[in-house]
Image (spheres, rainbow, N blue to C red):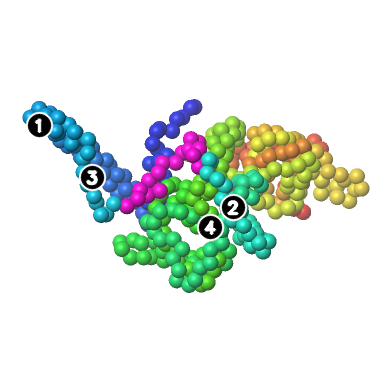
Amino acid sequence: MNIEIPPGLTDLLQGYTVEVLRHQPADLVDFAIQYFTRLKEKEEQQQRIESRQDSDADAMQTESTEDNEESGTETDSESDFEEPVINRLNRRVSVCAEAFNPDEDDDEDMEPRVVYPKSDDQRNRLQEACKDIILFKSLDQEQIFEILDAMFERKVEPSEHVIDQDDDGDNFYVIERGTYDIYVTKGGQPLLVGKYDNHGSFGELALMYNTPRAATIIATTEGALWGLDRVTFRRIIVKNNAKKRKAYESFIESVPLLKSLELAERMKIVDVIGERTYQDNELIIRQGDKADCFYIVQSGEVKIMIKSKTLADQEDNAEVEITRYSKGNYFGELALVTNKPRAASAYAIGPVKCLVMDIQAFERLLGPCMDIMKRNIVNYEEQLVSLFGTSLDLENPGL
């Protein structure tokens, strides 16, 4: 079934999502009704204003024509030099009003690369601060180096405002050290909604969605941050995520296991998967280890090997290959479905690229596929019986 996303739907849902994050409503359904009702009212009001403006313009055009016939060329010459209306409240256009399409907006690719020189100590501290930042996980090594080059150090003092709610987004920040309070203003009152304690990052929301800051961040101790400017952030991170998302969406749709999922369910999977690469004969999962991830082969080939525990006392109890997986196949689900240790090991055959989903996302998003995966356990049992004469290794993989 070919389903096309209606024009404007993405922007509409992004706007709603940002407001939810800013206001943190207790009742999402009630908040959605209020939000979209206000949106519709504004749209209708704007249409009425434009309609009146069109009517006024027609009337003014008629009057102008009559006046010009009376005043002759003098009016013609003066009409080209209308005195501008000065508004003392005018301010520069917010960067958050700019439209940004990661696929089409290449202007920022022409910007010179930003580089802040760093000492070896600064570089080491920066790498340590960034090692667990989720936004950087899908970047390649060259992009990581470019990000690190472009980041600058910012020292903060207690009570210093790092960012303020409703301001334009200028930088993304990674915390090296220090504690910070997160405030969101509701009904004119700032509410403490969270804290950062010596690690984490913030400020990406305004840069990714071109919206005002959704919260105020205030340092509660002396601290150090690493900032990344808006242009570099959007050029590398936003564009990279958009391209990877497109690639993943297309691939996920081709995976047989996931065809039974609705489009919205597949989109959620796209948002949580990561990517890992392996070299020839590299171990991907080890028999007997605790399970933490589910794997889908994106490219290359993987061989599944098992060493029988029922033959552990025999000298010739070597690992036996039981199957191979290629593009679109999945593995690692058995231990997650049965809540037992890994029943087999997996090795790369040549270069291999896998999409990886952690156990929390697996349990949350792949419920509709669970019956299919449980049916496959029967196939595994048949393979083990044919190899070892028993399926005990599958029933008790951790023994």
Query: Which residue sits at x=92%, y=48%?
Result: 315
378 is within the stretch colored magenta:
no
Give the mark toward the camera: 2 or 4: 2
Query: Disc 2 or disc 1, which is closer to the eye?
Result: 1
Distance in Å between CA atoms under marks 1 and 4 = 61 Å
Residue at the (52%, 49%) spot, across then down? 233
Task: Find disc 3 in the rendering and name its residue.
Answer: 84
Dot 2 or dot 4, earlier in sequence? 2
Reading the image, the residue beneath label 1 is 71
Say which mark, if any, is on residue 115.
Answer: 2
- At label 4, which amino acid type do we have? Gly
| Inter-mark Cα distance, 4 to 3 | 40 Å
In this rendering, position of residue 72 left or right of residue 224: left
Q: CA distance from mark 1 to mark 3?
A: 22 Å
* Tags 1 and 3 touching, CB below 8 Å: no
Label 4 sits on residue = 227
x%, y% of residue 187?
30, 61
The residue range painted magenta reads 91-108
The quadrant holding residue 317 is: top right
**How far is mark 2 from mark 4, CA to CA?**
12 Å
Q: The disc labelled 1 sits on which kind of residue?
A: Ser
The circle drawn on residue 368 is none
- The numbered mark, 2 or 1, whose residue comes first in the sequence reads 1
